[in-house]
Amino acid sequence: MTSLKRQLFVWLLPLYIVTAVVAMMVSYRQYETNIGAFMDGQLHGLANSHIQQITLSKRLPVLPSVDEQHSEHDGTPIVQFWSSDGRLISGSRPVPGLTLQSADGPRDVEADESWRVYTLLASPISVQLVQSNAFRHRVMWHSAWKSAEPIAILIPLSIVLLWFAVHRSLRPLGRLVHTISEKDERDFAELPIDRSPKEIAPLLVSMNGLLKRLQMAFATQQRFVQDAAHELRTPLAALVLQAERLRAKWGDTSNEELDRLEAGIQRLHRLVTQLLRLERQESLARKQELSVIEIGNVLKDSITDLLPLADQRRIDIGCRISEVVRLRADVNDLRSVFDNLLDNALRYTPAGGAVDITLMRQGDGFVVDFLDTGPGIPPALLERAFDRFYRVLGQSAPGSGLGLAIARSAALRSGMRIELQNRSDRSGLLARAHLPRST
């Protein structure tokens, strides 16, 4: 996946460096023109000075010798006097291959090396000044570099500032990503557009439209589940009465078909009850009522309510509370978690089995374990067990596949986490509820 920030930086950084290099080249060209004109002006003035001196004194001046060091490294001009017929009469240093130029003014001449030659033709003596082009270019580059040196020094700082500018420009996008990541599957609030860049405003408008459509679809689904569950309660009540009348008519005589009918009605009644419970949990209008709760007391209440089911199946329930744990939470959500985990353990534990409940410290937090002696769940299906209406194939225990889904939904709202794992000592399942760290 390509990072937009990195992509912008990769494009802007080379562009910035190329711009700096071009600016330096333009600076060099300007210095080449200005310094070249200045040095040519100096050569012109020096040539005129020698012509005037010859005219006044009627003789050639004595020229000091100019060696290679002064000529190439210091830029000292070489002075030459030429006769009208092109013979070198006198000079501060001979230049192999160089002749008297045919016109006045400066020009570049290639002899034994590159020279800048200024010629001033006169009669009977002409003056020709020779200066090293290597020296002139070195001065031009040095001057251009000195002018560009602050830019070169500021390039690293400018790169940092460029990165900061890109980072700051993309900060609204980062805030938008954070806002979206904080939303859960029940949050349909519109994304803010006021403080967002106008370039991503169309995206936000489209996403807000999608959120509205999702909210409408979710509300329709909720109404359907709620209406269907409520509509089923009346015919279910009628079925229960009809089954009771049939049982009264048959008396105490065992009837396999009637037993199956009553079991089916009980399963259907449980399914409707769980659908109503699920609908209440997922209702957007539902408000959590937070209070300080002692976890041990909530566990005892859940055990008390489900003792009839345990007695009916002859299942022994053990409870061990290692220490007093208090938590600020919604008691209804906690009861939903504990009730469904305990109910699930009781229904999948064979008759005569045992379910052990333990509240204990683990690391820097607390956990509640529900340990049963049932068949367990294949490891590959442990996570799927939380899916709605999902039941492991081959299980004969009554159920609708909603208990664990309801427990996880309530746990997430309370900041809890539920994990399932098979027992290692024997067959059975361990359902562990991790309490929030604020306990």
Image (spheres, rainbow, N blue to C red):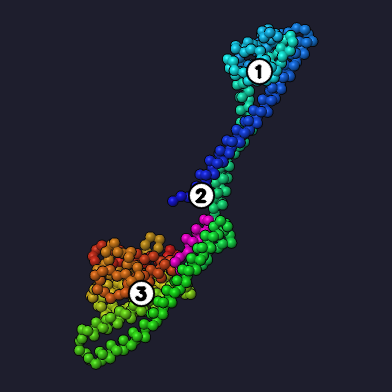
Distance from Cα at disc 3 to Cα at disc 1: 104 Å
How crowded pointer 1 is (Cα within 10 Å; few <14, some 14-19, many 20+) is rated as: many
Q: Position of residue 51 (x, y in %)?
A: 75, 13
Q: Residue at x 33, y 84 (%)?
A: 236
Looking at the rendering, the stretch of residues picked out in magenta corresponds to 173-186
Q: Residue at x 75, y 15 (%)?
A: 49
Residue placed under numbered mark 1 in the picture = 117
Tell me if residue 439 comes above or below residue 228 in the rendering.
above
Considering the numbered disc 3 on the image, is that residue within a helix, a strand or a loop?
A: helix
Q: Position of residue 334 (x, y in %)?
A: 40, 72
The residue most toward the bottom is: 249
183 within the magenta span: yes
Residue placed under numbered mark 3 in the picture = 339
Disc nearer the start of the sequence (3/1): 1
Q: Residue at x 34, y 85 (%)?
A: 235
Instruction: Give the dominant element type of the magenta stretch: helix, strand or loop.
Output: helix
